[in-house]
Amino acid sequence: ERFGIRLVGSPRHADVLLVSGPVTRPIVSSLLKVYEATPDPKLVFAIGSCAIDGNIWHDSYNVIGGVDKVIPVQFYIPGCPPRPEAILYGIAQALGLVPKKAKAIRLAEQGS
């Protein structure tokens, strides 16, 4: 909470959805209901390898894959499992609460 991030019990009061597991066939309708119940503007984070692409279950009969197969995802936090510090840092960086550690570097075109 020191970053201004609070856990709420209802998607109607949320600004951000954190999805941390693979999307299975029975959960698709529930995930869509939660996404639609969250007011705009909203951010969706796929946290961990399972949420990003299904991880080791990506080709099983009951797993559709990553969250982005069902709802749009704006931010990905990799790891299996991702460290709590990585999750907090990714969320804080996405919300603009911390400065970026790296800057873009443009390489000069090399002539032949």
Image (cartoon, rainbow, N blue to C red):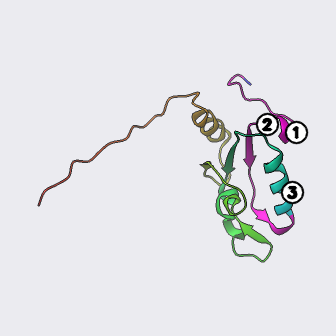
Q: Residue 85 carries which label?
A: none
> On the rendered structure, is 66 left or right of 103?
right
State if disc 2 and disc 1 touch (CB < 8 Å): yes
Mark 1 vs mark 2, CA separation in Å: 7 Å
Q: Position of residue 84 (x, y in %)?
A: 68, 40
Q: Is residue 99 above or below residue 34?
A: above
Establish if 93 lies above or below 49.
Answer: above
The single residue placed furthest to the left in the displayed view is 112
Instruction: Identify the residue shown where x is 82% and y is 62%.
Output: 28
Q: What element carries label 3?
A: helix
Location of residue 50 (image quadrant): bottom right
Task: Looking at the picture, tell me which residue is in the foreground, 46 or 55.
Answer: 46
Left/right of residue 74 with respect to residue 40 in the rendered view: left
Dot 1 lies on which element? Answer: loop
Mark 2 highlights which residue?
A: 14
The residue depicted at 67 percent of the width and 59 percent of the height is 68
Left or right of 76 in this view: 65:
right
Asked if residue 98 lies in the magenta stretch, the reply is: no
Cα distance, mark 1 to mark 3? 13 Å
Magenta span: 2-26
- Going by the numbered disc 2, the residue's amino acid type is Ala
* Mark nearer the N terminus (1 vs 3): 1
Tell whether position 14 is magenta. Answer: yes
- Quadrant in the picture for residue 3: top right
